[in-house]
Amino acid sequence: MLYQYILLSAEAAEEPGLFSPEQLGGYLSTAVIAIITVLISFLIIKFVIFKPMIKLLNDRQKLVKDKVEGAEKAEQDAQARIDESKQIIDAARTEAAQIINEAKENAESQASIIISKANEEAQQTLLKADDEVKKIKKTALEEVKDEVTDLAVEVSEKVIGEIVSKQTLEELCLKHANRILDAEVNKIDGQQ
């Protein structure tokens, strides 16, 4: 048993321990290789994958930002055009209202001028007609007066005979006829 113990001890002595310099050297070389592998992997991932991906994301972010700014500018331009259009429409409405008002005023002015001219013409026509009626009436009364005078003279001559001269009878009849005629003319003038 002792032999076995020595053999085991010799085998154990030959086998290096967990923290023996050979084992630590192996651990260190594995660690260095692992660190180098991790560093190389990190650099490959950083420059081959992350850098282009970050650049792609930055480009995409810039593109989106530019599109948003462009949309905002387009919206501002559209709002400015809408405001300008509203102003133009308001100005057009105001101008149309002014034109309509001016047209109404012109139409009313024209209508009042036409009505006043028509009234003047009607008044003048009435005055002319009234004057014409007076002239006709006066002429008719003159004719009737002459006929009545002649008739009165004839009747008087036959009734009175030769006592009063024909000339005196005519003067008397003419005098009375003129008085009656003047009264009729005054009546006509008084009615107007």
Image: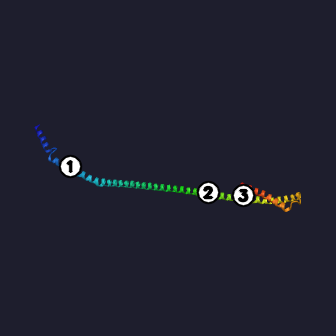
User: Which label's residue is closer to the chain start, 1 or 2?
Assistant: 1
Tell me which amino acid carries mark 1.
Ala
Residue 112: image tag: 2
Instruction: Name the spot of residue 76 as percent of width and height, x first.
Output: 42, 55
Determine the CA span between mark 1 and mark 2. 115 Å
Which of the labelled discs sits on residue 31, or is there none? 1
Residue at image position (74%, 56%) is 186
Lower position in the chain sequence, tag 3 or tag 2: 2
Give the residue at x 40% y 54%. 72
The reply to whether discs 1 and 3 touch (Cβ–Cβ < 8 Å) is: no
Q: Residues within 10 Å of mark 2 (few under 14, many from 20)?
A: few
Q: Nearest the camera: 66 or 36?
A: 66
Q: Which residue is mark 3?
A: 130
| Discs 1, 2 touching: Cβ within 8 Å | no
Residues at marks 1 and 3, CA–CA distance in whole angstroms: 141 Å
Q: Image height check: is 131 above or below 25?
A: below
- In terms of image quadrants, where is residue 175? bottom right
